Image: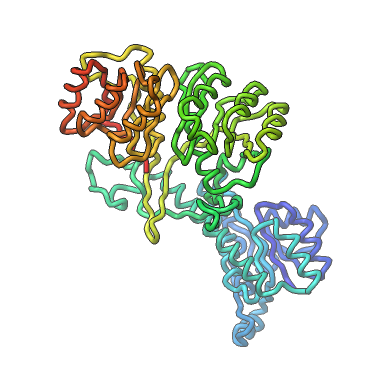
Amino acid sequence: MKALLSVYDKTGIEDLARGLSELGWELISSGGTSAALARAGIDHVEVSDLTGAPEMLGGRVKTLHPVIHGGILADRSQPDHLDVLDRLGIGLIDLVVCNLYPFSSDPSVELIDVGGPTMVRAAAKNHDHVGVVVDPDEYGNVLAELRNDGTLSLDTRRRLAREAFAHTAGYDAAIVAWLDEREGPGLNTAGARSGADEFDTAALLPPTIHLTLERAGSLRYGENPHQHGARYRIAGQHSWWDDVLQHGGKELSYLNIFDADAAWRLVHELPASGNADVAVAIIKHANPCGAALDTDLVRAYERALECDPQSAFGGIVAIGGPVTVAVAEAIAAGPQADVIIAPSYADAALAQLASKRKATRLLSAPSPEPLVRQYRGLGASVLVQDADRFVVDPSAWEVATVVRPTDEQWRDLALAWKVCARTTSNAIAIVNNGQAVGVGAGQQSRVVAAEIAVGKAGARAAGGAAASDAFFPFPDGLMVLASAGVAAVVQPGGSIRDDEVIAAADEAGIAVVMAGGERHFRH
């Protein structure tokens, strides 16, 4: 029995090689793997000695040879295949152990592996007769089965072949993504009009997208208990979720992760650049039901909770700073939260929350990586878009009314804009003194969204600032806010009735700011 060992990640390769050798297997190796085996004193045959051809072109060509691929690809159920090998003096290869250059870690032309994927695919294709191993975590399983049974079962070879094709698929996908990022997809191939000034080549979506997803964790269930769910990540890429540490509570569900992601991203967006304030956001069904800025985390939590304490029950609490005992006491005194997520916890704070909130998942997490591209499945179709970002800086907003916002209202407008942009459309958010006081989410009518927001805000709307995620098509929605005492409103503008809306605002004596047409629909 012969095994070909050629790996970039040499984790466990010496133990595997030694185990195979003890079972009487003949080992073939090349390059760095051969050097590692030689240092460990493990007998093996060099690929170049087997093929009679030296490595060349700086290692680009070493295993690409009929002696190697004939031994891997021969169909042992076909007598003529075996006759050819016998006539040419080519021996069979029964196991290929190979993993590829870590392209995603440092993308470059030199890390585009050719020989490795070719061997892996050849062995995986011929899995009826050949085993292939691409994951060092499988070495122990392979050795155990060989020791017990003397061979790998067909079921095992099929499972390993699937892993092998997934390995090469993810590798190729990473290369395509790198080429897209490096060169841009090009106007013509992306379907845009060649030479059109309004198209930014670098921002265009590529003509094809190749995603290989690897399961990163199981979930209790999907959106509902009868649905299966799991978290996947793009193969070869690291997600901030990979570094999340769960300190207590039940296993996370689909919605726990979905909502916690929304909460954690929002709490990182809320503080203005250079602002000493810390943020707390409370999320329910991916929508903010509380958000606040303050110099003190306890006050920030208490003020975020005041927005809508009823909706906060069973929600996600994102804390924009370390959880101290004082912060833990404030949270423990509040409504039950499904998830609390923070950068860190004091040991005593963890103990306190774990004892008083046994059902709550306690997560510590790093800062989230920026969203770049978003995907939404529609059966056999997928919608793809660039992630929604704040394009226009508030300093570029234009006041459209006679009345201008005060300095405090400017700060509240900026906060309301961020909260509103992360709320399901149609959305209205009202903020007063750094505190969200009313949020209207997910309404077919902007007027109803405004009514919900002012209904939740009550008297706290007076003197506050509001944001609308899209323009007011008529003055009625704006008048709902003005009637509640809202003093300043930011909206994208762009309606054919903007003049009517502004005239109504002037008559009501409130300030309206236009955000340069920057709309933030969210579905």
Q: In the rendered image of this protein, does residue 314 appear above or below residue 162?
A: above
The x and y percentages for residue 485 are 31, 19
Residue 472, by quadrant, is top left
Judge by depth and name the residue closer to the eye, 316 or 19. 316
Q: Residue furthest bottom?
A: 79
The x and y percentages for residue 71 are 64, 74
Residue occupying image coordinates x 15% and y 26%: 499
The x and y percentages for residue 142 are 73, 65
* Total numbered badges shown on the rendered structure: 0
Residue 120, by quadrant, is bottom right
Judge by depth and name the residue closer to the eye, 190 or 85. 190
Residue 357 seen from this side: yes
Residue occupying image coordinates x 69% and y 27%: 349
Which image quarter holds the N terminus? bottom right
Judge by depth and name the residue closer to the eye, 234 or 309. 309
Q: In the rendered image of this protein, does residue 256 appear above or below residue 169?
A: above
